[in-house]
Image (spheres, rainbow, N blue to C red):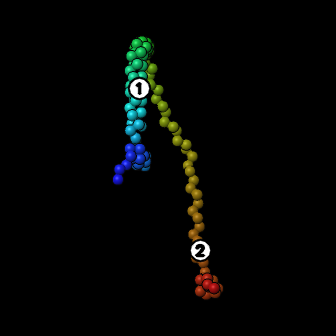
Amino acid sequence: MVFTSGFSSAIVFAADSTFGVPTRSEVSSLGERLQALRREFRANLADGSADHAGEIMALRRELAALKRRLADRPAVPAVKKRAAAKPAVAVKKAPAKAARKPTSPSKSGSGQRKRK
């Protein structure tokens, strides 16, 4: 039995979508998108490198100035925290429950409930 190319591609497409396998066109479009992202990344990397270098140098100068200021400060002695004082009030225990008294058997004599 001979299949036409249109018929066989329809069967392959249906089988691929059933099993979650990407089609050739989906793989091609993903490759194109990936290449476009690579180009965009390279363009941004080349353009922004000079801007970031200046910003990094400014931050390093600011950090050095802060370190100098911190080094010039006199040392502050550490303050010890006092231990929290415990209250002198004694905690009273609740009185124990009274023991149950044994119940006497019922007047019926059996002590069990009769079933109907």
Residue placed at 55% from the left, 43% from the top? 87
Q: Nearer the viewer, residue 26 or 77?
A: 26
Tag nearer the camera, 1 or 2: 1
Query: How many C-alpha atoms fall within 10 Å of the one at disc 1: few (<14), some, or many (≥20)?
Result: few
Residue placed at 52% from the left, 38% from the top? 85
The disc label shown at residue 108, or none = none
Query: Measured along the vertical axis of the image, is residue 34 above or below residue 92?
Result: above
The disc label shown at residue 36, or none = 1
Residue 104 x, y percent position in the rendering: 61, 81
Residue 89 x, y percent position in the rendering: 57, 46
Q: In the image, 103: left or right of 29?
A: right
Rendering quarter of residue 60: top left
The disc label shown at residue 101, or none = 2
Q: In the image, 95: left or right of 34?
A: right
Rendering quarter of residue 113: bottom right
Query: How many C-alpha atoms fall within 10 Å of the one at disc 2: few (<14), some, or many (≥20)?
Result: few
Q: In the image, 116: left or right of 47?
A: right
